Image (cartoon, rainbow, N blue to C red):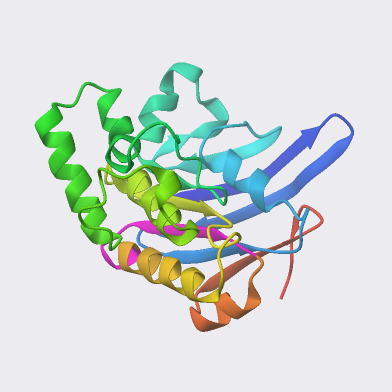
Amino acid sequence: MIRLYNVHKQYGQHVALRDISFTVSKGEFCYITGPSGAGKTTMLKLLYGAIQPSAGQLQVAGMNLSLLKKSQLPILRQQIGIVFQDFKLIPTRTVGENIGLALEVIGTPRALIERRVQAVLNIVGLPGRDHLYPAYLSGGEQQRVAIARAIINDPSILLADEPTGNLDGAMAVAVMDILQKINLRGTTVLVATHDAALMKRFPYRCIRFRNGQLEKR
């Protein structure tokens, strides 16, 4: 599902990632972890095609991202759902509109969008909240909406960048429960985090970074 071969990413004189090789199997749940500045976010940006590697080979969902053209990005993004720490919800759109936007832009019929929105709201435990605006939701609820938006296309891969970073303990656990449930449905899930307590509570394989390199353990 995800394969990296000697991937290198450099910005000018700064080396963000150096000689990274690993694989993630279909249906696996794993963490990308390490201290601040270790290269976690850069790694996720490479995986969803926001940036390209400076060297090496990167394969995601059957596509070679090292050779990816901008015109092919929409094809890749249909296979990948992305969850950010700061939610990135549009405040002037309702919950339902935020979630359904990815389907709206590709011309999906309104009736199908509404059915899919209700289905993913049930998955994240927010049935009937589609008419509310983000400002009326708690932080934990907004993150659930962000997760619902990420899975509206039924992606094969879900990437989450510090998804619990802005949440308290109980809300963080609730969000991880949802990510675990999504994984059990067959989605490959990668979570970037440095929350050791959360990783201990939800024990999965860890890919550890330090100073832009894989940490040997």
Q: Residue furthest front?
A: 136
Residue 122, x across and y down, in percent = 21, 59
Q: Is residue 102 magenta?
A: no
Residue under the image location 32 percent in, 31 percent down: 101
Which one is nearer the viewer's eye here, 112 or 157? 112
Residue at figure coordinates x 53%, y 58% from the top left:
163
Taking depth in this image into account, of 74 and 27 the one nearest to the observer is 74
Q: Which residue is painted at 56% across and 70% down in the image?
A: 168
- Residue range in magenta is 183-193
Q: Is residue 107 above or below residue 79?
A: above
Image side of residue 74 versus residue 52, left or right: left
Q: Is residue 176 left or right of residue 130?
A: right
Residue sitting at the far right? 13
On whether residue 192 falls in the magenta region, the answer is: yes
Asked if residue 168 is positioned above or below residue 20 in the image, the reply reads below
Residue at (50, 25) in percent of width and height:
68
Vertical comparison of 214 with 105: above or below = below
Residue 206: which quarter of the image? bottom right
Left or right placement of residue 119 versus residue 126 in this view: left
